Amino acid sequence: MWLGEIIFENGPDARGFFTRVQKQFQNAGHGIELQIIEDRHCNKILFGSLDGNSIDKLAQAFWLYLAEAKWDEWFRGILRDTYYFSDPSEQQHIIDIMHSILEGDRRELFVFLGKNGPESYVKESIGQMLREGTSFSFDSFVKFRLRPFFDYMEEVAALSIDEYKMEQEYLIFIESLREFVQGRPARMNLLHVLAGEEITFYDEQLAEVKRAELVKMIDRKLLNNHPVYVDSYSIAPLLSIAPAAIHLYAEEPEIPLIRTILNIFEERVELHKTDEFPARA
């Protein structure tokens, strides 16, 4: 005997959710009365009697279906309709940033979203509908009951777009500095750069290039044209010297300063660990 049904406006959603539910219950070794009906007029999933455990698993399957099958589709729609990003490659770049934020790869950004994501709300809402054992529409449920879910998604979109714009500004900045370097004659054939608590420069003979000497070498146009981004202690001297080759000694190649040096000078840079610095060998 069927006690309730979920009605879908389109077949792919019905089939996708049905498959997700089957997988959820198979993995748990738990049975459930479930049937899918598809025809030209109706797409629906019928379910029988549900105990508390079955409702929890159905709710989990519902959440996983949204997260795995619908999230990117809806997120792309927000980018297109709310923020007017129509280019598919731009959309995909922002989607990739979004996933990296949600997966915790950008912890400095994830904290802005707060501790409570939409998962518990979605599972609680669908669980309530299932406990009532009635018929309901998947599409109406999404539209009217999941407003907090979409609010959260819009927060993520705004954060991802800000990060995307910053990345684009950074790429433009890096490209302008590459052009600056390429247009300058090298003032040294080889420069050793030791990045520890402070950054220190050494010439080919491993004699330290003192701060006062570095200051004299700095091209003031750099600081005038890029007052925010160009560090007068590290990036500005490197750009002004424009060495033909750089031996860079650093323990953490992913920190922003080291990554920036690598991005600007590219094939001119040879990266080493700090304990490989010749004076310490």
Image: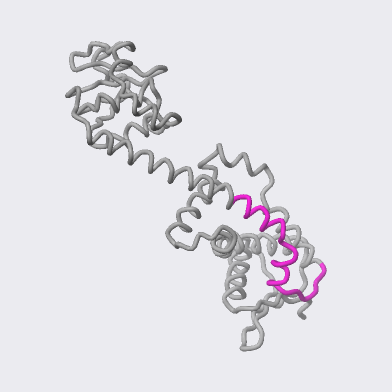
Horizontally, is 81 left or right of 204 in the view?
right
Percent x, y of residue 54: 72, 64
The stretch drawn in magenta includes residue 139: yes
Percent x, y of residue 126: 74, 63
Horizontally, is 72 left or right of 51 in the view?
left
Percent x, y of residue 92: 46, 57
Q: For the C terminus, which image quadrant?
A: top left
Name the residue rendered at 38%, 22% in the picture.
Answer: 232
Could you say which quadrant of the image residue 187 lies in?
top left
Name the residue rendered at 28%, 35% in the picture.
Answer: 180
Q: Front-most of 188 and 13?
A: 188
Magenta range: 132-156
The stretch drawn in magenta includes residue 266: no
Q: Which residue appears farthest toward the right when viewing the image?
A: 132
Name the residue rendered at 31%, 21% in the picture.
Answer: 218
Name the residue rendered at 56%, 61% in the picture.
Answer: 68
Q: Is 272 drawn above or below residue 182 in the view shown?
A: above
Q: Front-most of 61 and 215?
A: 215
Q: Is 178 drawn above or below residue 136 in the view shown?
A: above
Q: How many marks?
A: 0
Q: Front-most of 70 and 200?
A: 200
Q: Is 113 drawn above or below residue 248 in the view shown?
A: below
Q: For the N terminus, which image quadrant?
A: bottom right
Horizontally, is 79 left or right of 187 in the view?
right
Q: Front-most of 220 and 174?
A: 220
Could you say which quadrant of the image residue 110 lies in?
top right
